[in-house]
Image: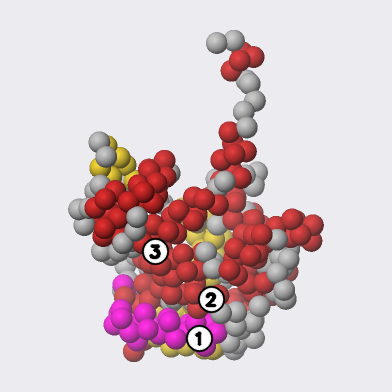
Amino acid sequence: MSTSAAQQPSPLLFFQTVNAHQRTEALKAAIELEVFTAIGEGNTTAPQIAKRCQTSEKGMRILCDFLTTMEMLTKQGGHYALTLDSATFLDKRSPAYVGGAIEFMCSPELTDAAKNMTEAVRKGGTAMEGEGTVSGENPVWVKFARGMAPIMAMPAQMIAKLVDPNAERKLKILDIAAGHGLFGIAFATQNRQAEITAVDWKPVLEVAKENAQKAGVSDRYHTKEGNAFDVDFGTGYDLVLLTNFLHHFDPPTNETLLRKVRAALADGGRAITLEFVPNEDRVTPPDAARFSMQMLIGTPSGDAYTFPELERMFANAGFSRSTLHALPPTFQQVVISEK
């Protein structure tokens, strides 16, 4: 093949991208119809799956073929099977099932923001009314707390092991914008001497308290209702958790909060931050880099920050040192900042 032939332009990427919404809707339909669960139960042909899911055979055949092209199913001789990822995360019988996350991730509050992306690019921030997803007591965060908990269970446990590997000393922990509460709960589950105080809006904290009760740590799980920027945190904390929070705001706003966080820490205390951290080129790794767009369309001033940017914010707030830690197999990273 000649060099010129190898470099022929193709509209394929354009068509794949402009139709990408079909991938989202196909996955959403498969979760709602319990397709992955049906296959996991042993229904492997389109007629069998259609009967189990109460759909037409034609519709189910087309949906399963589409999911196969998405590499979410495999197909051989008319029989469909789950991939390792689908079996782990999309079969409702799996303890790691994450299908409920679509209630948050596909909620109108998020999808409508994406539809106004042109205006968000013009403005440099969300085109949604008010403050977008960071508006006071936005009900989307109750959906987040209920839907995203299964996805966050593994990173929560990994962070607890990273930060408190021996789990042998008493810890006073503040969990800011706790949401589902799993990050604080992971510390409390691992360390019987850990006391957690969670900060969030009252309806969101109800979800966190439910999860603490299920985990058997409700006697060491306390709450403070309200806006993290306004609530009196108290003092003497060994750890302050800032998980998936700083990306919602601009650096000056974050530095204001971080000064408050530093004041709440005991001597030798640490702030533990979980974030989507792109490299300084802002295009790698791609999944972390793409998160900037979510913040552009959903918040007035949020962004996905590089480690030097995060390091600078903590330094400006008076922290002495910050270090970056990978958290595989997730594509997020942990920043540990020392008072």
Q: Is residue 214 above or below residue 313?
A: below
> Disc 3 designates what residue?
32
Sequence-wise, the earlier of marks 2 and 1 is: 2
Q: Are marks 2 and 1 in contact (CB under 8 Å)?
A: yes
What's the amino acid at mark 3? Glu
**Mark 1 belongs to which amino acid?**
Pro
Residue 147 in the image: state x and y as whole percent: 44, 70
**Where does label 1 land, which residue?**
203
Q: Which residues are magenta?
A: 190-218
Of the pair 267 and 235, the residue shown nearer to us: 235
**Residue with the mark numbered 2:** 141
* Image quadrant containing the N terminus: top right
Q: Position of residue 155 (x, y in %)?
A: 41, 62
Instruction: Measure how far apart labels 3 and 2 are at the Cα level.
Output: 21 Å
Quadrant in which residue 294 is drawn: bottom right
At mark 2, the secondary structure is helix
In terms of depth relative to the viewer, which is nearer, 31 or 333?
31
Classify 51 as above or below 107: above
Alpha carbon separation for disc pair 1 and 3: 26 Å
Q: In the picture, which quadrant includes the C terminus? A: bottom right
Q: Nearer the viewer, residue 271 or 120?
A: 120
Q: Circle 3 — which element?
A: helix
Q: Is residue 198 magenta?
A: yes
